[in-house]
Image (cartoon, rainbow, N blue to C red):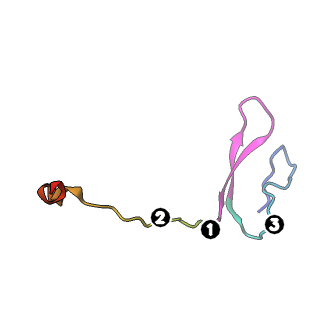
Amino acid sequence: MEVPTRNDAILDSVISDEPNMATELMDIGPFADGDHNSLLWKLAVKTQRESEDREVFDYSKVDIESIRR
């Protein structure tokens, strides 16, 4: 998608080595004190959630008398 960022100038808005990584490119208006426009886009990335399996003890059911002996 080609969106001008300054007057009619179209620059490389999002640089990536993967085609179609950036989608839904939108011009959201000019910066407050400048003549360039702000852009907003969605970036398609894959994430992987790391899980940590650990054993958790339930001490609320412990037999204190047996432990004392």
Give residue 17's mark. Answer: 3
3D distance between C-alphas at marks 2 and 3: 32 Å
**Is there CB contact under 8 Å for labels 1 and 3?**
no
Identified at 71% across, 31% down, the residue is 32
Looking at the picture, tell me which residue is in the foreground, 53 or 33. Answer: 53
**Is there CB contact under 8 Å for labels 1 and 2?**
no
Circle 1 — which element?
loop
3D distance between C-alphas at marks 1 and 2: 20 Å
Q: Which residue is mark 2?
A: 52
Earlier residue among tags 1 and 2: 1
Q: Amino acid at mark 3?
A: Asp
3D distance between C-alphas at marks 1 and 3: 15 Å
Q: Which residue is mark 1?
A: 46
Q: Amino acid at mark 2?
A: Glu
Quick one: which residue is furthest to the top in this view?
33
The residues colored magenta run 25-45
* Residue 18 image point, x, y percent: 77, 69
Mark 2 is surrounded, within 10 Å at the Cα level, by few (under 14), some (14 to 19) or many (20 or more) other residues, namely few
Magenta span dominant secondary structure: strand
Identified at 75% across, 42% down, the residue is 37
* Residue 41 belongs to the span the image colors magenta: yes
* Residue 33 belongs to the span the image colors magenta: yes
Earlier residue among tags 2 and 3: 3
Quadrant of residue 2 within the rendered picture? bottom right
Mark 1 is surrounded, within 10 Å at the Cα level, by few (under 14), some (14 to 19) or many (20 or more) other residues, namely few
* Residue 45 image point, x, y percent: 64, 65
Quick one: which residue is furthest to the bottom in this view?
19
Total numbered labels: 3
